[in-house]
Image (cartoon, coloured by chain):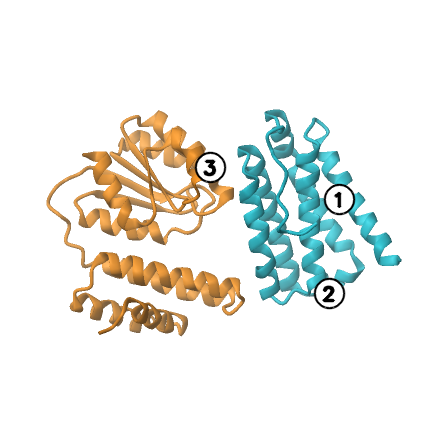
Amino acid sequence: MTTPDARRDALLDVACAGERRACFDLARQWEAEGISAREFYNDIVLRALAELGFRWERNELSIAEEHIATEIIREVVAFKASAIRPAPSAKGIALVGCVPGEQHDIAGLILSNLLEEDGWSTRFFGQSVPKEDIVALAARMQPALACLIARTLPRLDSTVELAREIGAASPRTRIIVGGIDSPALRSILRPYVHGFADCPVTAVTTANSLAG
Amino acid sequence: MDVADAIPTLETVTADDIEAFHREREKILASVRDRLARDAELDFAARDLPSARIAAECAKIFAENLYVSVKYGLPGALHDYLAWLRPYLAAHALPPSFIAKMLSAFQCAALAFVAEPSNEIVSAALRGLRQADNSRTREGGA
């Protein structure tokens, strides 16, 4: 039996070799084997991305090599999106993306897939969108949910500002922050957000409990 | 001072200090970069583009971390960043002397900032950097 670790390593091997088609083949194969979304995203994709980051930190991959592998994995996640069969229930609009300055947006793409599969209508804005534009979008759309991704300490400031301004522009929007696991940072954000998520899979659970 | 040492409390930092730091942080950052660039031992970094880029990028991220750490009173978070930085720099084949000086420059800036929060905060940070620099120069010459 193939373990999640073995699958993660297989994905890493082909992604680091720059073999995009082989990555799609793996995703197709795992789909056919019926692996769960939790295993695919949490145990394979997110752990492969984390490992790429470690390899870059240890200088085992150059920035260019790390980006090539990361972009291939991003395409695998987008490839998975093409096979989504959304749940029939309409849970409302979910705005998903990175706070200004944050670049780690693949978790947001994964979350968009999962939310869509669960019956949410998602709008994934990715990264590098100015705060004013995100707030204006929220004011116009009045989404039921806003999922903001912030991975690093320097993004704390922009997360606080963005959450506060979305809250003012769209008071009914439930705001979830993902990527920040430090209790100290969460306590700073708590007055402005309604929930935190440790990973995209738990973000869906949190979203549903807030919407319920 | 070693990286493992705790950064002092940030409780005495006021909103005015934070605003002053926000306005002046480019100057603090420039002073760190300048200090590294002027160090004769570190000439290689100026000639070696990847090393220079890593040093400049780390200095920029350090300044961002310092600002947020001070604003929200999170000395532990800043400490975590500095603790992460050492193995990262070592993995990128930067010489131990370079790493020690870079971390020392960062820590001096952080310590000077949190030790003397006042309207003169930026000059205090720069003073701390200069004092540390002079002291190391004397030690090096002895």
Mark 1 belongs to which subunit?
B
Using a 10 Å C-alpha cutoff, classify the residue at mark 1 as few (fewer than 14 neighbours), some (14 to 19) or many (20 or more).
many
Q: Amino acid at mark 1?
A: Leu
- Choose between B104 and A33: the one closer to the eye: B104
Residue B101 relative to residue A49: left or right: right
Using a 10 Å C-alpha cutoff, classify the residue at mark 3 as few (fewer than 14 neighbours), some (14 to 19) or many (20 or more).
some
Tell if the residue under mark 3 belongs to the same chain as the one under mark 1: no
Q: Earlier in the sequence, mark 1 or mark 2?
A: 2
Chain shaded cyan: B
For residue B79, say whether it is visible: yes
The Cα atoms of the two marked residues, 1 and 2, are separated by 22 Å
Residue B41 pos. (x, y %): 78, 62
**In which quarter of the view is residue A122 placed?**
top left
Query: Pointer 2 and pointer 3: residues touching (CB < 8 Å)?
Result: no
**In which quarter of the view is residue A21 placed?**
bottom left
Tell if the residue under mark 1 belongs to the same chain as the one under mark 2: yes
Q: Which residue is mark 3?
A: A158
Q: Amino acid at mark 3?
A: Ser
Residue A49 pos. (x, y %): 39, 61
Residue A167 relative to residue A59: left or right: left
Task: Assign a secondary structure to mark 2.
Answer: helix
Q: Which residue is mark 1?
A: B129
Mark 3 belongs to which subunit?
A
Q: Amino acid at mark 2?
A: Phe
Q: Which residue is mark 2?
A: B44
Residue A154 relative to residue A30: left or right: right
